Amino acid sequence: MPSETKPVPQVSIILIRETAEQMSGSGCCGRVAGDPCLTGSRDAFQEVRRQQEAFGILHRAVVEFFAEQQQRGELTIVTVDPRNQPYLIPKLLKDVWRYRPGWGKGLCSTLQFFSLPAVIVNGRILSRRGRLLDPDALCHAVNEILTVSKAQSLRQEYS
């Protein structure tokens, strides 16, 4: 039986989330922000929480919008905790090597010259804190990359 090789996805999306390390009660049982005795009725961790929620919306939109492409193997989406360096560094290197975004953009991605949360598409930093794309803009940008990749592979197939 010949071994089937898995086709290389046309688009690889790496969603690197915010480091969510609120050391004081941010687990499943509640948050410090909900306890007025501890916070003095201030909104503790408001900015971090807002960024986490915005990134969650972005994540859901991308996963839902590209569900069919993921099933067909045209696109992969991974969400990574930035503290998981043993996975993240090889994944970034592999995507830069595979998709060849250019040496400057590839170097920025592999050396992690971006702020969190970040979105890396085909080895290129597409979005980061301060420049986080809204879900529609991100889906549109990824869809364009996917369309161009399909057109290029069709041209190569028929040449």
Image (cartoon, grey):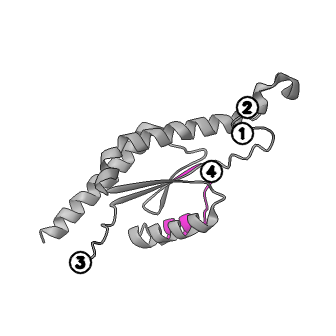
Q: Is residue 126 above or below residue 59?
A: below
The answer for how far apart the CA atoms under marks 3 and 4 are is 43 Å
Circle nearer the N terminus (2, 3): 3
Between residues 148 and 80, which one lies in front from this camera angle? 80
Amino acid under disc 2: Gly
- Report the residue at 76% width, 43% height from top: 22
Residue labelled with disc 2: 30
Rendering coords of residue 21 (x, y %): 73, 47
Instruction: Name the residue type under label 4.
Output: Leu
Residue 106 x %, y %: 50, 68
Residue 97 in the image: x percent, y percent? 44, 73
For label 2, the crowd category at 10 Å Cα-Cα, with few meaning under 14, some 14 to 19 and many 20 or more, is: few
Residue 96 can be seen in this image: yes
The reply to whether residue 108 is visible in this rendering is no
Sequence-wise, which precedes: disc 3 or disc 4? 3
Which residue occupies 16% across, 69% down? Answer: 157
Q: Residue furthest front?
A: 1
| Residues packed near mark 4 inside 10 Å, few (<14), some (14 to 19) or many (20 plus) | some
Q: Quadrant of the N terminus?
A: bottom left
Bounds of the magenta segment: 104-119
Instruction: Using the image, tell me which numbered label, if any, was put on residue 2.
Output: 3
In the depicted view, which residue is nearer to us: 143 or 35? 35
User: Is residue 73 shown left or right of residue 158?
Assistant: right
